[in-house]
Amino acid sequence: MTTAANAAIVLAAGASVRMGRPKQLLEFAGRPLVVRTVEACLAADLRPVIVVLGAQRDQIQPALAHLPVIIAVNADWAEGMASSLRAGLSELGKFSPTIPAALIALCDQPAFSAELALRLQAAAATSLRGIVAARYAGRCGAPALFRRRYFADLAALQGDQGARVLLQQQAADVEPVDLPALAADLDTPGDWDHFRAGQS
């Protein structure tokens, strides 16, 4: 598998209810988190980069206007994360039926970087397993690289089930990559304040 052949699907459709404002647009190091995530994917030679938008789409999409991304609109975003996976994979299928793997990334992991994305791809290049996932806080989670054979399983998830369900179900086929920096969980204003305090 060559690194340039893999795609990225950035999930950014949530309403950020607990945060009280769009997490996607929180600024870290001078740029919105969703922009940082996309830029990291592009710098890691992931193509195409598909960004799934739903809630607050009108606020978020302009921040991405200068970047070479494909916007997938998830009209069913309120259903939960599974609907965003379906929207992203559907858009990916229109782009190319032969993409070998897709990196599923979240927009609220400020430590995510091109270096980490490249580490996941490097692990995939030498592993026979179908999934390569970041491991932090004692378990595997996003970002995770799924080979094509798992696309149908991802698209079959329902409700608020994210890709982590598949990581648990297929644990024997997951290659973990220890990336402890990704453990920061940004759900509330307190989480955001705590993270920023740790960066100063």
Image (cartoon, rainbow, N blue to C red):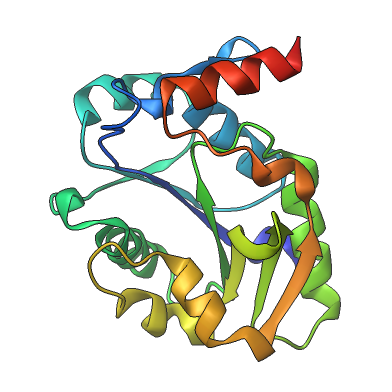
Give the percent coordinates (x, y) of residue 152: 38, 83
Q: Who's the residue at 49% across and 38% down the image?
A: 107
Quadrant location, the N terminus? bottom right
Would you say 27 lies left or right of 81 here? right
Quadrant location, the C terminus? top right
Question: As rendered, which of 71 and 195 lies closer to the eye?
Answer: 195
Picture quadrant of residue 177: bottom right
Question: As rendered, which of 101 and 154 lies closer to the eye?
Answer: 154
Can you see residue 1?
A: no
Q: Who's the residue at 26% across and 32% down the image?
A: 17
Give the percent coordinates (x, y) of residue 19: 35, 26
Q: Who's the residue at 33% across and 75% down the image?
A: 155
Give the percent coordinates (x, y) of residue 44: 72, 46
Q: How many marks?
A: 0
Question: As rendered, which of 121 and 19 lies closer to the eye?
Answer: 19
Would you say 93 lies left or right of 173 here? left
Give the percent coordinates (x, y) of residue 84: 30, 56
Q: Who's the residue at 43% across and 76% down the image?
A: 97
